[in-house]
Image: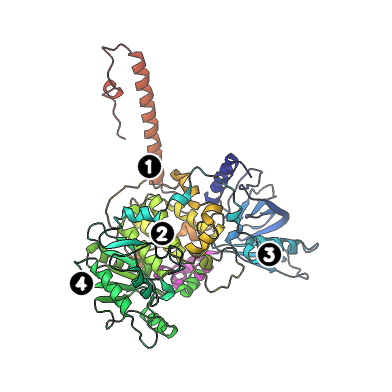
Amino acid sequence: MASASTSKYNSHSLENESIKRTSRDGVNRDLTEAVPRLAGETLITDKEVIYICPFNGPIKGRVYITNYRLYLRSLETDSALILDVPLGVISRIEKMGGATSRGENSYGLDITCKDMRNLRFALKQEGHSRRDMFEILTRYAFPLAHSLPLFAFLNEEKFNVDGWTVYNPVEEYRRQGLPNHHWRITFINKCYELCDTYPALLVVPYRATDDDLRRVATFRSRNRIPVLSWIHPENKTVIVRCSQPLVGMSGKRNKDDEKYLDVIRETNKQISKLTIYDARPSVNAVANKATGGGYESDDAYHNAELFFLDIHNIHVMRESLKKVRDIVYPNVEESHWLSSLESTHWLEHIKLVLTGAIQVADRVSSGKSSVLVHCSDGWDRTAQLTSLAMLMLDSFYRSIEGFEILVQKEWISFGHKFASRIGHGDKNHTDTDRSPIFLQFVDCVWQMSKQFPTAFEFNEQFLIIILDHLYSCRFGTFLFNCESARERQKVTERTVSLWSLINSNKEKFKNPFYTKEINRVLYPVASMRHLELWVNYYIRWNPRIKQQQPNPVEQRYMELLALRDEYIKRLEELQLANSAKLSDPPTSPSSPSQMVPHVQTHF
């Protein structure tokens, strides 16, 4: 096993590689000779290839394949090209051309990635060179199909911070002031017997017994009962999440479920109605009755009002992102850019998700009513809405660690199906369960950070590194579909947390303009005029689109902060030097500040 110092060095050197800006050819450049390797990463093979760069044409290079990455180094004297791709990013590997192909560079491999880019390699036709590379790449990019472990279970990196300790549910609920006279913590799900996709610890109404919860579970899809996500610190209205009721075509009712929603409403005596936000379009909610689902009707839930938020399902979002990919890589058609972007409907979906979250936040912030949020199963659109509303309402979640807790709580512990939506280590790229739901959430966060540039402690790189490691399989943070599966696989014991990497080098991910504010509610403008495509994420591989350089104001601000620190350090040195000289007790000032009262600085 590599030493801690070695693995720490490797982790930081690789991270610098993965997040630095792309060069004019759209890939990272590095002039060092060594192939970077993490602790636990082993070289499998290397081979001479032609990289078909979509921007600069064919480039001769040597590709190195490890159990974690594909690493290409140019062999041409006039090119220092580097390509560094975690194998977890690969979605599909296809053979290009056949044994009889005659065109130049027509024989090789075509690799589709999950991060909006494609890679093409041409190989020699003799000696089965393509077959060997295809088989090795397929084996290590899709380890689950070959009974191999994901790289996260082989990763031996060491960090000076343990990211697994970031989220403690009891501490987070205590921060919110829970439990109290109206809400209690229950361990009914400690063995995941009530609901196998929920966390072990749940917050429920004080008046609801565990037997009540069991009866309600029978009427909610996947047994995902209504449980508390967040409580307002002043007006005590709450955000509650769950799945759809099992109404079906016959319009079934469940007295226990109806009573339970009334009990939730009555935890706050100031409100007369419980607001239910169904994330789906109403036509989809009605259609779900045919498969046993449905929604809360007015005649059954007298003290509730229901609103549909018209957010489309995972299949629509998947197709929308495919269209975005088509217009951003490898070529961007400048002349039709706006119409092409509009045709993807991506920003329309972002708008609808943000609009829904704003409605949830406004209801709770105004004290008008408590809110219950669900979609079909309560692990996709529901997570988007609750987490974004909580981000708008609670400034704690806008800090680096607060955001990590928000992701751990609302997404990871509450069972967003990361394994199914991302397809970690799985070769079935056509799986209809795949969908960019979490990417869409992070995009919404980025849109908010653009509109409120001083409200978030983290910067854009923080969001990008989260998305990069959503796919990489380097960390255990996003693996598996739910908490119970992670416990069975002992993920916290056998893998490293992404938060370990981030929190051991926080300065890299800090927003210099951040101003900490307590209890400020953020209401982003969710109109199409105020939303934009996240160029530094979606088009970062394309050198022909002018990369958005660091904000000059931000750069100057960072320089001034560094200058201030330098002046303060110099001032302290001068004060210490003077106090050493003026050692006579009667004339010596009692403190450095008394000694140099006239020294001032505009910082």
Amino acid carrying mark 3 in the image: Leu
Label 3 belongs to which residue? 109
Q: Tell me whether the residue at label 2 lies in contact with that at label 4, contact meaning CB atoms closer than 8 angstroms.
A: no
> Which residue is more in the foreground, 558 or 576?
576
Residue with the mark numbered 4: 272
Q: Marks 2 and 1, how far apart in space?
A: 34 Å
Depicted 56 relative to depicted 4: above or below = below
Task: Report the disc number at residue 557.
Answer: 1
- Which-is-in-front pick, marks 2 and 3? 2
As shown in the figure, which amino acid type bears the numbered disc 4?
A: Ser
Residue range corresponding to the magenta coloring: 322-350
Q: Is residue 25 above or below residue 530?
A: above
Residue nearer the viewer, 300 or 410: 300
Q: Nearer the viewer, mark 3 or mark 4?
A: 4
Secondary structure under the numbered disc 1 in the rendered image: helix
Whether 582 is among the magenta residues is no
Nearer the viewer's eye, disc 4 or disc 1?
A: 4
Above or below 396: residue 251? below
Q: For the residue marked with disc 1, what is the amino acid? A: Tyr
Sequence order check: which comes first, mark 3 or mark 4?
A: 3
